[in-house]
Image (cartoon, coloured by chain):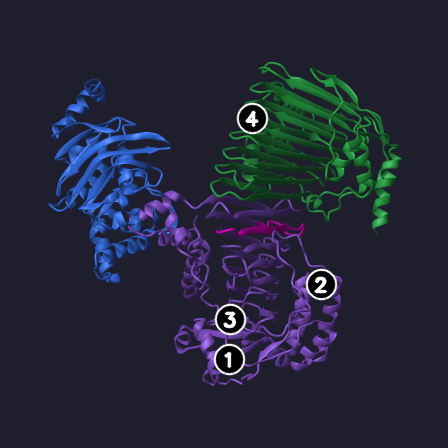
Amino acid sequence: MMKIENLKASIDGKEILRGLNLEVKPGEVHAIMGPNGSGKSTLASVLAGREDYEVTDGTVTFNGQSLLDMDPEIRAREGLFLAFQYPVEIPGVSNMNFLKAAVGEMRKHRGQDPLTAKEFLALVKEKSALVELDGQLANRAVNEGFSGGEKKRNEVFQMAMLEPTLAILDETDSGLDIDALRIVAQGVNAMRSPERSFVVITHYQRLLDYIVPDVVHVLYKGQIVKTGPKELALELEEKGYDWIKETVA
Amino acid sequence: METKTINKVKEWVERAEMGFFYEHPAQQEAAQALLQMSFPTTRDESWKYTRTAKLAQTSFQLELAEVMAEVSFEEFVPALSVSSNFFGTLHTAFCNQAWRCEVKGNESDHTHHFVIKNKKKGIWMQPFWRIEVKENARGKVVIHSEMEVDSFLNGKIEIFLAKGAHLDIDLIQDHAETHFHLMQVEVIQEEGSHLNLVTHTLQGGWIRNEVKIELRGQRAHAGLSGFYLPENQQLIDNHTVVDHQVPHCTSNELYKGVLFDQSRGVFNGKVFVRKDAQKTEAYQSNKNIMMSDTAEMDSKPELEIYADDVRCSHGSTTGTFDQEALFYLRARGLSEMGAKQMLVSAYINEVIDRSGQPLVIEYVKKTLSERGRVIAD
Amino acid sequence: MEILDEITGKDYEFGFTTNIESDKIPAGLNEGVIRLISQKKNEPQWLLDWRLDAFKIWQTMQEPEWAHVQYTKPDFQAISYYAAPKSKPKINSLDDLDPEMRKTMDKLGISLDEQKRLNGIAVDFVMDSVSVATSFKEKLGELGIIFCSISEAIQNHGELVQKYLGTVVPKKDNFYAALNSAVFTDGSFCYIPKGVKCPMELSTYFRINEGGTGQFERTLVIADEESYVSYLEGCTAPQRDENQLHAAVVELIALERAEIKYSTVQNWYPGDKEGKGGVFNFVTKRGLCDGYKSKISWTQVETGSAVTWKYPSCVLKGDYSVGEFYSVAVTNHFQQADTGTKMIHIGRNSHSTIISKGISAGKSNNSYRGLVQINPSAQNARNFSQCDSLLMTDQCGAHTFPYIEVNNSTAQVEHEATTSKIGEDQIFYCLQRGLDEEQAISMIVNGYAKEVLNKLPMEFAVEAQKLLAISLEGSVG
């Protein structure tokens, strides 16, 4: 599915990722944990193709192609989805129009016929139920006036609509109360399948109670310093990141 | 038509018994230039709302202003330059008094205090101040004008803030209704400097303040604010230009007025963001309360922006008193007058409190309260 | 962002000329020309006198310079002031139209066809100087609505024209208004009688076709007591190297409880990417809310013209009258726009709303200039203004020049303005969802302008959205 080799990236001349390696196979759920400033969000941004970051070394292969050579929208159409940590508000643009355009592009890219209005609405109805997003939300402007929880649910709703092969969840749990967290996780779990992989980026173990990972990685100073089974997350929770810092040092 | 206007200036200049004080070549040059100029009229965009006819028709005699106090200022011979506008040129030609102060170190607990006064009828004053704050120095300045009788002051304040300099400056204007007052404030700010200018217009018959700030060094900040409470037929005009020339500078502007009787208020603020001044953050606000049906407020907040990565906004509101609040206070037993005074003071305290000088804040509030304009808090 | 640099902006879609033989008088302006125009149009003496008076006034005036625009002033002697399609059709049915003219209309996507007839839109089509077709006349006639070219109105409804012409925009109002008053050749006229709600959108399309001509149309809309009309004008011009002058005057009069909704989709040729050619659009539009509770609403989507100078205004004379101004102005390449509105409050409890959305791209300059004036008589007047500017490149300029004059203590006037860059985060978010940059920008800009687009009649809102997208293609640097 995706293989990251020796990835180095910097912003404003400051190196954040310092030779990161990671392989995600189809159907796997990988959790990436790490202290603040370890490079978690940078990794998500680099994979999605944000221009602020400069990739200085390394390769990322995504379904056999070089991911780093693609424009952001091509990455998306190839099946890479980023659930943003801070989804931006786009005033005046209705969620529905936005999604319709996005779904249209995806289908075009995959050589599928466009959905009829009826089919589209049916899909919206089906997928929005996944995250218990009421119909009203779908008709509002993209993320505008949404609460933190609504924004995150909207991200998962969009993910369900776009059906990516690889979804990166960037701190999707931040700012969520326990109910919202449960709903978001429920949505993600419903989408788990042997063809679809997830990279779950989080600071806390809490989310992993709901979205149970196959593998847990610890990111520190721009590198994966430890990899283990799901129990590693619990260990981290208990001992804190200082434990890792000491181990690495 | 043309000859007539030229004659008017000439006549007025002659009536004022001109003489060149500093014998600086710029003075003669400016005097020559004046003969080709005329008093601005409402056809000039920057004088659209302020008439000069009355001033142009009055005769004044050029004299020295009386200096009541000059804490840490010294007299000096200014470097004069020719200006393009009428009053600037007039100032250059006939400037006859100049003081300067330099702030070198951290002078946070020291105030450069200047009080200028006039009790003499029919005179015309042309003072000049230069305030220089050196690299990383911090200074405090108060320029306080008390003009008691009919007279005309055409003044200029030049401010230079070096790298990392910090200046709190308060202008206190307290004038008779028969006094004409024009004050040009020109500020140049270098990298990382910080300006906090507050204009307290307690009263005056005809006041025009022109503040021009050039942000020449990155990360400089300019804060400018002012209040005005004109009554009777007074006119208070505040013109400001904040010129963002380089990236990463910020400016914040707040002018508030409460207008009584047949008074007039004018606000014209321009935020200018030059082509390369990316990451500029500029905020400008003008708020007014109309206390009388015969008062007039003309507000022109302008943005002229040539860079794209900027955050600029301005707002202007003009309206009536908050009747709900007024009623609430009266329901609690305050007289109508008392309630109004309380609300007015709450309104303008936002500006007064922006001063970086507690003594000024105290003085201004106390004075307004003693005069029954507001209730002190 | 680099991708966009590679994409060249889409060419002006409407830049075709129509090969129709035309009757064009030689260039130049003098009393003789005005007499000739008046004679060709078989006008009554009062109008000829009115024109000549306007010409005298114009000769004493100077071209205004206060707007934030720069251009080479037109040579008024180099313009032909009258050009009419020679085969001036006497049209009873649209099938009688000159086939070339039909083609023109089809290319414009104008709706003289059955489809839009079903939509219920009556169209008056003005090409160069004269009105060539007005549809739906009969149906409107049944309701007593007069909708025709102004030339026709002068012939058949002279008393109405004489009563109202120049009452809202006097001859001496400004340089271009005076010029228009002297030389206007056609335009639309509309009268809605008392108590009639016009059942369909009335629409006029203006097109400059001939080279070296100016277009000086005059529109007069009168809504009698308790009537309602929604009126739309569209504008296009062919691509030409030289600048063409368009100096129109639009006057609206709303009597007691009447409402006029006037929408404009302006897409005059903006010049090419180097700033060559394009239309000078110097237009005076003003509405008079004459009666109690009358209402005038201006909505404009401005994407065209090399230079625009235009301030659709409302004089709120009636008590409780309402004035509205909703505007989207897009400038790209070397376009310059100085546009806004004036809200003159005279009546008690008069209310006005101004929503202006400026979008600057390329090396263009886009200015909002607006006046809100509360006169002493306007007790409890209210105004709210919101003027936002969106910047697409670091080469363009966005300016806001509001004038707020308050002369009454019971007034409440609020003005807000913001200027910001198009959000890179927003673009990236769209890209991440698989949209390309063009789509992303089009979507964000349309969202930004939505408040205004929503005010347009439905069918035109869609056209306007497309137009915004086309105007901004290849615009982000």
Label 4 and label 2 in one chain:
no
Three-letter code for the amino acid on which mark 2 is drawn? Lys
Q: Which numbered tag is attached to residue B194?
A: 4
Label 4, label 3: how far apart the Cα atoms are: 56 Å
The residue lying toward the viewer, choosing from B257 and B278, is: B278
Q: Which chain is purple?
A: C
Using the image, determine if residue B339 lies above or below residue C380: above
Residue C423 in the image: x percent, y percent?
41, 44
Residue B336 in the image: x percent, y percent?
62, 34
The residue lying toward the viewer, choosing from C31 and A210, is: C31
Three-letter code for the amino acid on which mark 1 is drawn? Lys
Label 1: element kind: helix
Q: Colour in which chain A is shown?
A: blue
Q: Residue at x 25, y 51 (%)?
A: A77
Label 3, label 2: how far apart the Cα atoms are: 27 Å
Using the image, determine if residue B348 lies above or below residue C129: above
The residue lying toward the viewer, choosing from B6 and C356, is: B6
Instruction: Please identify the residue farthest to the front as the structure is shown.
Output: A57
Q: Which residue is mark 1?
A: C137
In front: label 3 or label 1: 3
Q: Colour in which chain B is shown?
A: green
Report in which chain the residue with disc 4 lies.
B
Three-letter code for the amino acid on which mark 3 is drawn? Tyr
Report in which chain the residue with disc 3 lies.
C
Callout 2: few (<14), some (14-19), or many (20+) C-alpha neighbours within 10 Å? many
Callout 3: few (<14), some (14-19), or many (20+) C-alpha neighbours within 10 Å? many
Count of number-bearing discs: 4
In front: label 4 or label 2: 4
In front: label 1 or label 2: 2
Earlier in the chain: of badge 3 and badge 1, it is 1
Q: Residue at x 52, y 38 (%)?
A: B277
Label 2: element kind: loop
